[in-house]
Amino acid sequence: MLRYFPVAYDDELLYSQIARYNRHSCSPGWKQTLSELFGSRTVAAVVDLPAHLGQLQEHTGHITRQSAHDTLWRQTLFPVYAPFLGPDLTDRVKQSMLSGYGGDIHTRAGLSASSVKRPDRLKVCPECLNEQLQKNGEAYWQRLFQVTGVLFALYTTASSELLLCLMFQPISTTTQQRLHPS
C-alpha cells in the first residue's frame, strides 16, 4: 500500500504531481513510479488528457481524499476541452480518462485531426517559477499555462505592479513516457 503521495498545488497538472512523486520517492525510474501509482508499467505519462484516473485513485485516494472525478476536473485539461465536445462526446472522453482504456482519447476528442496544434513543450512563467521556489521550495507545472494559445502570464510583483510575463518552453512533451519535474 502506498504511504506517500504529494499534495497537489493550486492549478497543478496531475502530470506534475506524479513527476514530483517520482523525484520525492527517489524512484529508480519512471516505469517504477507508474507501476506504484497505477498498478501498471504500461501506463503513459500524458500531460493534458491522461487515462487510468480510476486506477490512480485506487492507489492514492486514501492519501489524497480526492476522487478520480475531482482529479479529472482539477488537474487535467479536460475542463478546457469539454465545452467544445458536446455532451455525448464529453461523456465518452471522460469515461476513457477514468478507465484503463485511454488509447483513443485524443482522437475521440478530435485533437489528433485538429488544425489547432497542441503545444509540444510544457510552458512555464519564469516569475511564477521563482515564486513557486520561494513559497514551496520546489516548482511545478501549472495547468493554465499548458492550454493551447496561452503564451503570457499576468504576474503581480511584491509592490503590487501587474506585469505581463512571456512564458518559455523548456521541456518537450514529445518524449512520451518520461516524467519531467518543473
Image (cartoon, rainbow, N blue to C red):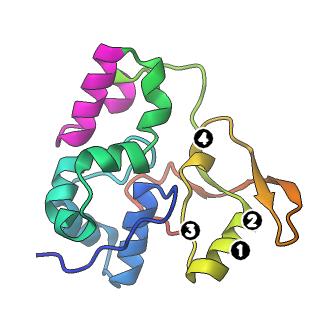
Residue bearing the label numbered 1: 130
**Mark 3 or mark 1, which has the lower sequence index?**
1
Rendered-image quadrant of the C terminus? bottom right
Say whether marks 2 and 3 touch (CB < 8 Å): no
The quadrant holding residue 78 is top left
Q: Amino acid at mark 2?
A: Pro
Q: Amino acid at mark 1?
A: Asn
Residue furthest left in the image: 1
**Mark 3 or mark 4, which has the lower sequence index?**
4
> Mainly helix, strand or loop, the magenta region?
helix
Q: Is 7 covered by the magenta stretch?
A: no
Which class describes the residues within 10 Å of circle 4: few (<14), some (14-19), or many (20+)? Answer: some
On residue 126, the disc is 2
The Cα atoms of the two marked residues, 4 and 2, are separated by: 18 Å
Residue bearing the label numbered 4: 119
- In what element is the residue under mark 2? helix
How far from the left and from the top, in percent, is residue 73? Answer: 38, 42
Residue bearing the label numbered 3: 182
How far from the left and from the top, in percent, is residue 117? Answer: 59, 30
**Mark 1 or mark 4, which has the lower sequence index?**
4
Give the residues in magenta. Answer: 87-107
